Amino acid sequence: MRIDSLLAQGGNGKDAGTGAVSFPIYQSATFRHPALGESTGFDYSRSGNPTRQVLEELIAKLEGGRRGLAFASGLAAITAVMSLFRSGDHFILCEDLYGGTYRLLDQVFRPWGFTANYVDTSDPEQVSKAITARTKAILVETPTNPTMKVTDLRQIRRICDEHELLLIVDNTFMSPYLQRPIEFGADIVVHSGTKYLGGHNDVVAGLAVAATEELGEKLAFYQNATGAILGPFDSWLLVRGMKTLGIRLDRAQENASAIARWMSSHPAVEQVYYIGLDNHPGREVHFQQAGGPGAMISFTLRDAGKVPETLSRIKMISFAESLGGVESLLTFPARQTHGDIPEDIRRRCGVNDRLLRLSVGIENVHDLINDLEQALA
Ligand SMILES: *Cc1c(COP(=O)(O)O)cnc(C)c1O
């Protein structure tokens, strides 16, 4: 099956006893054993739950990995991945990383003895230069959030091979519908399922996919041992949301392309960051590893003073944190998603007080443009 069929068919046929097309929500904490030493395959829902398992098998298949694991949030998934490492280990990360991932590494794991360098991973030379004898892994987002820098996954894989490092890719922005990093050598893919996979701004969830059985076993151990699992109902919401991922993204991308073109000639807008635009510097590399530009647009206003006004004048589009849902959202990264990143790093990667980020939804594109037009007027 191709990916859109895999998505639409998620969970169908998996409940053999009933034939349920929509896989049921197994809202049970524990499971009866037929006899001593016998099991249905489930014993306690932290260790495994049928509804969560459907989601986990689905995301593993979509990403082309061996094992998928579902967590209470994207950050819980990243925490489980970080559990693979030990005090003294060093990491290289892209500098315009999601703010919550930065906060986790800097304020939780740094005090535990993890060290990290934040570099522009779109430049492999900077990555190579940052490697030390203690480096264990490289974590990238591509395209980055919010300034849409593109990292060449194949090149980073080569660097990882030379130095025996793990390559971890946060694929939240693209989703497996557009980009499957394991095909380009990623060892682990993580997701905030809250975004495109869930797609309806109604569930917080995280996923991790391991490329190998061995890594999958280890992550499953930490998932069970640390316990930040996704509950049955939220697992069901995610499977349900993912059924329409393909058509949602097709429509959102189409909208985003039209909005980005319109915005590029708007007098109040200084710069538009969108991979679908011809002048985007990472375009060529991006389209070697991804099937579309995605539906995230960042842009700077000429006048920082116009930011508060724009955020309060926007009507149909919501001024809110998050992305990837059917409803369009406008975010002010410097204060919201990236507020925890130190100002010097933020400046270096262009997250300034004139930058706004638009997660384009599936509404009618004319309504979206009209709303932006009246807000920017
Ligand atoms: C939102 C987000 C996260 C964190 O996920 P949560 O589900 O909010 O914990 C991680 N990475 C990226 C790129 C995100 O956008």
Image (cartoon, grey):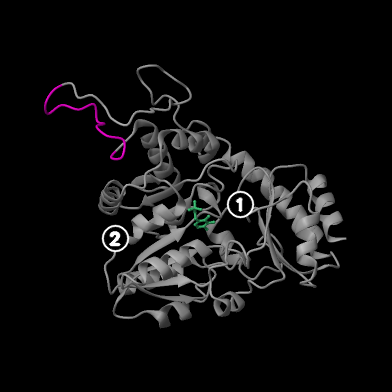
List x then y, in percent, for residue 250.
65, 44
Instruction: Tell me: 103 left or right of 362.
Output: left
List x then y, in percent, for residue 375.
83, 57
Please identify the quadrant where the C terminus is shown.
Answer: bottom right
Residue matched to label 2: 84
To which quarter of the image does residue 331 belong? bottom right
Q: What secondary structure predominates along the stretch shown in magenta?
A: loop
Crowding at dot 1, Cα within 10 Å, few <14 / some 14-19 / many 20+, comes out as many
Residue 153 is at least partly visible in this image: no
Mark with earlier residue (1, 2):
2
> In the structure shown, which secondary structural element does the residue marked by tag 1 occupy?
loop
Mark 2 belongs to which amino acid?
Leu
Please tell me which residue is depicted at 52% across the width and 75% down the height of the picture: 120
List x then y, in percent, for residue 232.
41, 34
To which quarter of the image does residue 374 belong? bottom right
- Which span is picked out in magenta? 35-47
Disc 1 to disc 2, how far (Cα)?
28 Å
Give above or below for 301 relative to 241. Answer: below
Instruction: Tell me: 44 left or right of 174.
Output: left
Residue 191's disc is none
Q: Does the numbered disc 1 mark a residue whose Cβ is under 8 Å from ligand 1? A: yes
Please tell me which residue is depicted at 79% across the width and 60% down the height of the picture: 310
Q: Does the numbered disc 2 mark a residue whose Cβ is under 8 Å from ligand 1? A: no
Residue 323's disc is 1
Whether the residues at callouts 1 and 2 have beta carbons within 8 Å, the answer is no
Query: Residue 281 or 189: which is nearer the viewer?
Result: 189
Query: Residue 159 or 16: which is nearer the viewer?
Result: 16
Give above or below for 267 relative to 227. Answer: below
- The verdict on residue 39 being magenta is yes
